[in-house]
Image: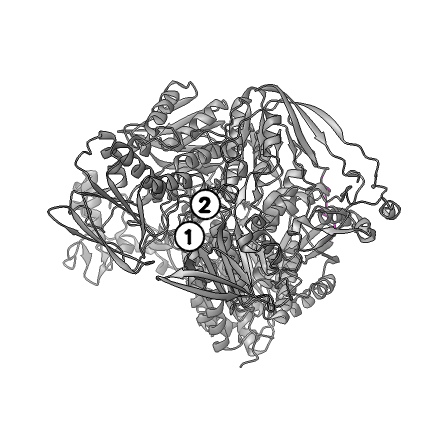
Amino acid sequence: MIVAEPKPIKEVAGYIKDCTKILVVGCGGCTSVCMAGGETEAEMLAASLRILRKMEGRELVTAVTTITRQCEPEFVESISSKVKEVDAVVSLGCGVGVQFLAEHYRDKWVLPALNTVFAGGTVQAGIWEERCGLCGDCILHLTGGICPVIRCAKSILNGPCGGSQNGKCEINPDTPCAWHLIYEKLSAMNRLDLILQFHPAKDWSKERSGGLRNRKREDAVL
Amino acid sequence: MVVGGGIAGMQAASDLAESGFFVYLITSDDSLGGRMARLDKTFPTNECSMCLLGPRMTGSLNESNINLLTRAKLTQLEGEAGNFTAVVERQPRYVDEARCTGCGLCADTCPIEVKDEFNGELSKRKAVYKQFPQAVPNKYAIDIENCIRCMKCTRVCSAGAIDHQQQSEILNINIGAVILAPGFESFNAQQLGEYGLGYYSNVVSNIQFERMLSSTGPTGGHIYRPSDGAVPKQVAFIQCVGSRDCRKGYGNEYCSAVCCMASVKEAIIIKEHKPETEIVIFYLDMRAFGKNFDRYVNRAVGQGIKLQRSLISSVKEDPITGNLSLSYCDKGQVLTEEFDMVVLGAGVQPPKSAGELAKAAGIELNQFGFAKTSYSNPVETTRAGVFAAGGFIGPRDIPETVVSGSAAAAAAAELLSAARGVSSREIKYPEEKILSSEQARVGVFVCCCGSNIAGVVDVSEVVKYASGLPGVAGAWKFTYSCSQESLQKLKEIIHEFHLNRIVVAACSIRTHLPLFRNALREAGLNQYYLEMANIRDQCSWVHRDYPEEATAKAKDLVAMAVGKVRHHRPLYLKPVQVVQKALVVGGGIAGITAALSLAEQDYQVYLIERQESLGGMLNQLYLPQDGIKPRELIEKKIHAVKSHPNIRVYKNAELINVSGRIGDFQSKIKVEKTTIELKHGVVVIAAGCREGNIKEYMYGEDKRVITRLEMEEFLSSGNNSLVKTVVFIQCAGSRQEGREYCSRTCCGQTVRQALALKELNEDVNIYVLYRDMRTYGFMESEYRRAREKGVIFVNYQPDSPPDLQGGYNGINIKVKDPSSRSNLELTADLVVLASPAVPAEGLDKLAGLLKIPVNEDGFLVETHAKLAPLDVPTPGVFICGSAHSPQNINEVIAQAKGAAARAAGVLSKSHLLAGGPVAKVNQEKCAACVTCVRLCPYGVPYIGSKNVAEISPVQCQGCGTCAGACPNKAITLEHYRSEQLIEKVRAMFNMEVARSE
Amino acid sequence: MSDFKPKIVAFCCYYCAYAAADVAGSLRVQYAPEVRLVEIPCSGRIDPVVILKTFEEGADGVYVAGCLEGDCHFLKGNIRARQRVNYVQKILGELGIDPERLAMYNLSGAQGGRFAQIANEFTEKIKKLGPSPLRGR
C-alpha cells in the first residue's frame, strides 16, 4: 500500500485560512489501512481545524466524507454535490488522491492533509515500513525477494559493499544491510549460487526519472 | 412451593422458576421483602437495602413462573417427596388485589390509627394500610382486628376494591417439594429489664433504630431521641442483647452472627449524618468474620467510633434529662459514662410461627427452635422433599441467606429433575411497535427515591427543565420509580403520550436497568429505547452539601440522557443454542458438591482437579464437626462422584484456555501431558483455599510450634501422652497488615481441637490466646462447653502479641492481658497457630482466564456482595466455596449447591438470547486493515470470504475496543456509537443543543 | 478564578469507574460536583474523535477512567484507552490546548473513595488551568 503520514495540523490550517467552508475527504483505501486518512482521521482533522478556528474566534464549517478510493474517477465524482458547497477540499488521500480530486474538480482548491511517504506494508500493528521503490523493473527473483534498490542505501545491485557492518548498514546502525538480508534469505533457501551471479545495470528508463509513466491494458479499455 | 417472601424465599423461587419449574411463593405477610425490607443500609458496602430489594420483589412478582400468594399459611402437608398436597390457608386482605390500584385514598380517610409494627411501633399507621411504601404487590390491606367497619374506605374507593366480607379460603395445591423460608424474628429486648427497653424512652432496639435511619421510616431518616426529639450527641450500642446468654429464659445461648456488623454499620451511618456524634459500641467479641468485614470495622474505628470490650450489666436513666448511664470495666477500672441514646443489639430467634409451621410441614426443629438440618446438607430437613432456607436454619447475614435460598432451590431441583419444564410457562410480551420512521418522542421520568434524591436535588425543577428539552414529549416525577405502581404508570404514560424513547433519571444502571427495560418491553417498546441518568449515586448522594450544584448537575445528566436516547436504535436478541453441560473447576468439597448437584439435576458435568486425587482440604480434617467427620464425608462424596454416570472426572488437570460465551464455552484442559478440549454451557469455579505461610511465633524454628492443620493430624494420631500444656494462638497471620481479613474457620476449629484434647486427657492445660473469639452462630455452644471444661481463653491486643521463647522445658510465652493489665507467663509443650486461609495457588491465573476480578486479599469478587454472592461479572461463570472467601464446610456446601442452582438456571434452557449492544461492521466501509482482528481480546473478528471484517454477535463481548480503533469508522458498537456518545456530551452544553435544533 | 465552575466529562468504564461511582454514592463520599459521567462498556471503547469533539463542545477537562492495569474486564481495553488518550494529548498540544486537560485514570469497581479523590483532584487541576480556550466560543 501507499503509506502516508499526517501533516502538522497548523500547516493544513494555514492552507485554508481564507476559507469558511471546507470538505474533508478521507480515503477508504491505503491511507485508511495505514491509519492516516480514514474516516477517523478525517473526523479528527476536521474537528482540529474547527477548534483552531474557534480559538481565533472565527467559524469554520466542515463537512466530512470518505470515499472508497480517491484514485478512481467514479468514487471521486460521487461527492460532487458536496464539493460544490465548499470553498476548498482537504484530501486525506495519498498524493494520487489529492491530484485525482484536483483534476476532477477543476475550479476547486484541493489541499493535501498528508505527506505521502512510501510504498510499504504493516510490519506490526501501528508500524509500517517501506518495501518498494517503484523502479519499474523488478529484480526480486534474483535477490530472494528482498529489494536492494529500495532497501540498500546505495541501491547497489551487486552487494554488499564494504560498509556492511555486522549485518547493519554503515549509514545507520539500526538499518539492516539489504545485501546481508539477501545473503541470509538465499542461504536459508539453499540458493547461495544466486548471490554469485553478476547483475548488470538495470533498465533505469522505466524508473520515475524517465518521465510520467502510465500503463494500458487493451482488453480493459472501454 | 416456597414458604416465605423474604430474600431467601424470593431467591429460591426465582432460581427454580429460572430452571424450568413452576413455583407457588406464599407469605403470611402483606408484601414480599421479609426482614431485609426493614433495614436501611446493608454492610459492608452501605448500600441501600430497599434499592437492592425493590427490583428483586418486582422481579418475583412479574416472573411468569411464580404464583405469589400473600397472607397465606401452610397448614398441612400430605403425601411424599415428589408428590405432596399442600393445604394453604389464605387469610382475607379485605381488599381485592385485582382491583386495588394502590392509590392510598382508603388509608387517607381511615379514622383509626394503630402502632405500626413495621416501624418498630415508633409510628402510627391506619387500619387500612400498606406495609411500606415500596410494598410488592402494591396493594392495601385491612387490619380487621382494629377496623371499626365505618365503611369510609368503601365509599372513597373508586375501584371498588374494599370488601369487608372477604372470607379466608383453603387451597389444596399439588406440588413436588417444599422450601421453608419463614425467616427469623428479633429477640424482644424488653425481656431483659436491666436494659430498660420499653420504659426508658431513649433506649431503642436495633430494628427500631434501622427504621429511624430509613428515609421512609418514622423519622424520615433523621435520628432523634424519642424522649425530646433532640439530636443525640453520645450514642451507645450494647451488643449480645439476648444472644450468648446462658441464663434460661433471658435470651438465647447461640450467637446471632449479624448484630456486630449491623451495629458497626448503624454507627457508621450516624457518623455520616453527624460526624461529631460520639459513639461507643460495647461488645464481647467483634465478630467481623465475613468477606471485607474486618476492613469495614477498621474503617469505623478510623472514623472515631470507639469499640469497648465490656459486658454492660444494666442501663440507668436520669429521669430529668432522659440520659442514660452505663457502667463498664476497662483496664481493671470501673467507669461510668453518660449517653443520650442507647441502641440495643438485639439478637435473632426463630419466628413465633416456627413450631406451628414445623408441625404443618412435618419436620423437626433443633434445640434452639430453628429448623433441624444436617451439617453435610444444610438445607435438608428431617422430612424428605422438605427443605429449609434463610434465617430459619439459623442466624446468618444476607448473602448467606441468598446462598441458602439458591441451595434449597438446587436440592428441590435435584429431587424433581424429571418434572423440569412440565408446568412452567413462557412470558409473552406484546409485539413491538416499529418506529423507524417516527420522530423521537422522549418521555423523562425523574425519581425522588423517597428523599434520597429529592432531599438534595430539586426534582420539580429537573422535571420542568426536562420537559423543555428538544425531542421531549413530557416529563413526570415519581416518588419511587421502581415501585410496582410507578412501573404501571410508566407503561400507561407510554401509551397515552405515544412515547418512543424513555429516560429514567433515578439510580444506577447496575441495579435497575433490567427492571425498566422490562417495563418498556411490556409497553411494546424495544427495550433499548431506554437511557438512565444516575442522579442519585452520582449526584444527590455525593453532593449533599451543594443542593444548587447538585440540581444543576442532575439537569445536565438528564439532558445528556435525552441527547443520547434520541439516537438510540432498536436492538434485537437472537436465540443461540446452549451446550447443556457444566465444567466444574476444583475437586474439593465445593466442586464435588456442585458437580453432584448438577449431575442429579440431569446435566453432564466435567469435573477437573489440579491434584492427583479428589477431596481437597477435607482430606486433612479429622475432627468431627456437628457429628460429621470431614474425611468420611469426603470419601463418601468422592465415591458418589466416581460412580455417577453424568460426571466425568479429570485429575492432574488444569484449565489453560477458555473461549466462547455463556451457553457455549470451549475450554482447553491440560491433563498430564495431553490437552483436551471440552464444550460446556457454564463454568463453576470451586478452587478452594490453602493454608498460608506463617512467619510469626517461631513457626518453622521450633518443632513444638505447629499449625492448626498439623494439629488435626496430631490429634488423629492419638500420640499425645507427653503433652501437658497446650497454647493456641489465634489470628496467626490473619487480621494484620497485608492480610487484613479474618480466616473465619480458625476459632471454631480451635475450640473443637481444645475439646478433643480435653476428651483425650482431662488434665491437659489449655490456653487460647485470642483477639476476638469468632464462634458465631451455633458454634457458640462449643465455645461455652470449652470454657466449662476448663479451657482458659486469654485476650490479647494486636499491638502486644504473645511473645515466644524456646526453652528446654517447653516454649515460654508471655502475653499481656488487657483487662487485668498484667502479664501472663505460660510454658507450653505444644503451640498451635491458627494459620491463615489464603487463596489457592493459581487462583489469580484462573480468574484471569475467566475475567473474574480478584479483591485485595486475592479472593474472587462476586457480582454483588449481598444479592449475587455466587455470580461473577462474566456471564455463565459461577463461584463457590473458599475461592470466594474462607468458609466452614457447611457454608461451602451451601454455596456449592447454590452455585449449582445458578448454573442450572442457564443449563435448563435450550437457547439463550444473544446480540444487542455488540460490535457491528459496516462492510462497505471496511478497508480490511486487520486492526480489529489484531486488537480483539477475544479473537472474534476475522476477515471473511468477502475480504472484509466479520464479527459474530454471539461471540462479541461488547467491549467496543475495535470500534474505538477502526480507522475508517466501519465498526460501531451498538448502543455506544460515537454519534450517541457525542450527542450525550453535546447535550450538557445546552447552548449547543439549542443551536443544533 | 474562584467563581469558575468547570465542566468536566468523565468517560467511565461500566465495570470499574461507573461501579466505583456507585460505591462512592452508597458510602456518601462527597466530591466535586463538576464531573459528568458518560458510561461506556469498557474504557477501550473510547475513541480519539469522541474525546476531541468533547473538547470542541466546550468541556474544560476530560478524563477516561478504566480498570486497574492488568484487571480490565475485557483484558486490555484500558491499555488501548491509555494509548488513545496519549495520542489525543499530542493533538491537543498541536492545537494549543493544554494536554493536561485530558487524563487517563485507573481504578477498581470497589474504590469509591478513589473515584471521589480522582474527581476532586482533576477538578482542582482544571480550576487551576482555568476555562478551556474553547469555552463559550
Q: In the image, which residues are magenta?
A: B432-439
Mark 2 Cα-neighbour bin, 10 Å: few <14, some 14–19, many ≥20 = many
Q: Nearer the viewer, residue B883 or B273?
A: B273
Quarter placement of the C terminus of chain A: top right
Residue B204 belongs to the span the image colors magenta: no
Marks counted in the figure total 2
Q: Residue at x 58, y 56 (%)?
A: B204
Confirm whether residue A101 shows in the render. Answer: no
**Residue B666: numbered disc:** none
Q: Nearer the viewer, residue B331 or B415?
A: B331
**Do labels 1 and 2 touch, CB within 8 Å?**
yes
Q: Position of residue B906 (x, y in %)?
A: 53, 32
Q: Please indicate whether residue B71 sits to the left or right of residue A61 in the image.
A: right
Q: Is residue B154 above or below residue B68?
A: below
Q: Is residue A187 above or below residue B210?
A: above
Q: Which residue is mark 1?
A: B284
Q: Earlier in the sequence, mark 1 or mark 2?
A: 2
